[in-house]
Image (spheres, helix red, strand yellow):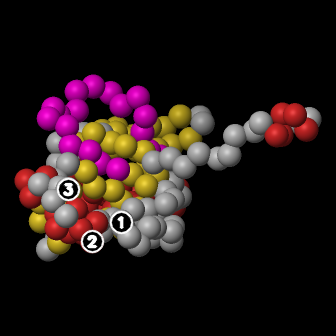
Amino acid sequence: MDETAEAFAPAPVHWKVVIDAVDPHAQADFWAAALGYAVEDNSALVRRLLDGGALPAEATVDFHGRPAFRDLIAVRHPDDPYDEYSGTGLGRRLLFQRVPEPKSGKNRLHLDLHPGADRREAEVERLGALGARVLREVREPAGQWVVMADPEGNEFCVH
């Protein structure tokens, strides 16, 4: 790469995956347990917004004994940094946002979980106990995996 191209190279962009959900809090609990992630605790921010009149009470819910936003909640990798003021993760995150309609079609994007071939069967059982269901098992020359659906029907694969 020449010096001109390097001077105009963009900085890496922070991102998160946003998933539509009828019940974002139930989805957050499922995916936090599935991935070993932490559900973000935005309660201090929610309290400040409520106390300052910037957030109406009907825009909140009680979630595990603390106030949370009614229509969105995220899970984050437990080792990643987060903003102590807001509770918002600054690394790997899944954000679940409330939508009025259920899922209606095949995902165009999905997560692949990689516990390892020696742990695949046990992981599929564990995820089933959390509320996921097996859609199909795939055995191809390129590999094997299990296609599953989370409690709201979003597909994901266990390799």
* Residue under pointer 3: 54
Q: Is residue 147 left or right of residue 7?
A: left
Cα–Cα span, label 3 and label 1: 15 Å
Which of the labelled discs sits on residue 86, or is there none? 1
Residue 42 spot, x, y in % from top left:
29, 65
Could you tell me what secondary structure mostly forms the magenta stretch? Answer: loop
Give the residues drawn in magenta, as a range: 95-112
Q: Secondary structure at mark 3?
A: loop
The residue at 42%/45% (across/down) is: 17
**Above/below status of 118 relative to 12:** below
SS type, badge 2: helix
Residue at image mark 2: 44
In the drawing, what numbered circle is on residue 5?
Answer: none
**Residue 7 percent coordinates (x, y):** 82, 40
State the separation of the CA atoms marked 3 and 2: 14 Å
- 79 within the magenta span: no
Q: Residue furthest left?
A: 58
Mark 3 in CB contact with mark 1 (< 8 angstroms): no
Determine the residue positioned at 35% across, 50% down. 95
Residue toward you, 156 or 90: 90
Compared to 115, does 142 lie above or below?
Answer: above
Q: Which is more foreground, mark 3 or mark 2?
A: 3
* Three-letter code for the amino acid on which mark 1 is drawn: Ser
Q: Where on the picture, by quarter, is residue 98?
A: top left
> What residue is at 36 percent from the left and 65 percent from the top?
86
For the question of whether residue 5 can be seen, the reply is: yes
Instruction: State if disc 1 and disc 2 touch (CB < 8 Å).
Output: yes
Q: Is label 3 or label 1 in front?
A: 3
